[in-house]
Image: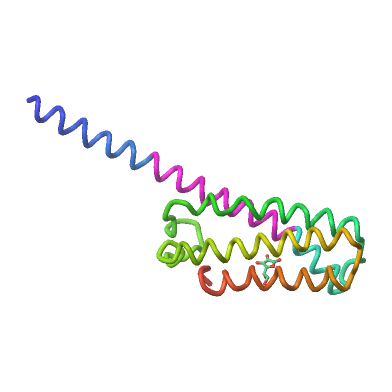
Amino acid sequence: MKRYLFGSLGLLMLIVTGVASAQSIEKAIKYRQGAFAVMGWNFGAIVDMIKGKRPFDQEDFARRAKIISDVSLAPIEGFLTESSEGQTKSKFEIWENFADFEGKMKLMQEAALNLSVVSLSGDYDASKRAAIKLGKTCKSCHDEYRKK
Ligand code: ASC
């Protein structure tokens, strides 16, 4: 009887922790997607300014670049647990090559900080180059680690 009771208790605890971790994985996925959405929203506006689809407004450009740079520090925390299942385009390869993934994330953060600093100068050509450089760091990670 005792053995049966402890066995059932153990099973219940496993189920409860399992459900809890599934919930925290879902939260982590939403967290990193939210951060990327903020970055994409603002980078989209910057790209429009560069393409001439929206007037170049240095103050607005710099404000958006700062948001991207600040938020670029956020998403890595949402990748700490293996979470390639569910509502995500993240490939399993992220967790197989986590050091490489983290390195690419750092390059993106550096490019975002660079864009933020350069855009304060008001130098349009330098800002454009910095934005293109940042876009390349986004793409390099997407090519390898994001499902189509
Ligand atoms: C964006 C956005 C991305 C990147 C990428 C750059 O605005 O949403 O994922 O730029 O397209 O190559």
Image side of residue 16 versus residue 92, left or right: left
Residue at the far left: name it: 1
Q: Nearer the viewer, residue 125 or 38?
A: 125
Which residue is at a point 87% across and 71% down the rendered structure image?
Answer: 53
Residue 77: x percent and y percent? Answer: 53, 49
Residue at the far top: name it: 2
Residue 48: x percent and y percent? Answer: 82, 68
Above-or-below relation of 132 to 113? below
Which residue is at a point 80% across and 56% down the rendered structure image?
Answer: 64
Image side of residue 127 versus residue 94, left or right: right
Residue 10: x percent and y percent? Answer: 21, 34
Picture quadrant where residue 133 is located: bottom right
Q: Nearer the viewer, residue 26 or 50?
A: 50
Quadrant for ligand 1? Answer: bottom right
21 part of magenta stretch: yes
Q: How is the image coloured?
A: rainbow
Quarter that holds the N terminus: top left
Which residue is at a point 43% across and 67% down the rendered structure image?
Answer: 93
37 part of magenta stretch: yes
Q: Nearer the viewer, residue 19 or 106?
A: 106
Residue 137: x percent and y percent? Answer: 64, 70
The region drawn magenta spans: 20-41
Picture quadrant where residue 84 is located: bottom left
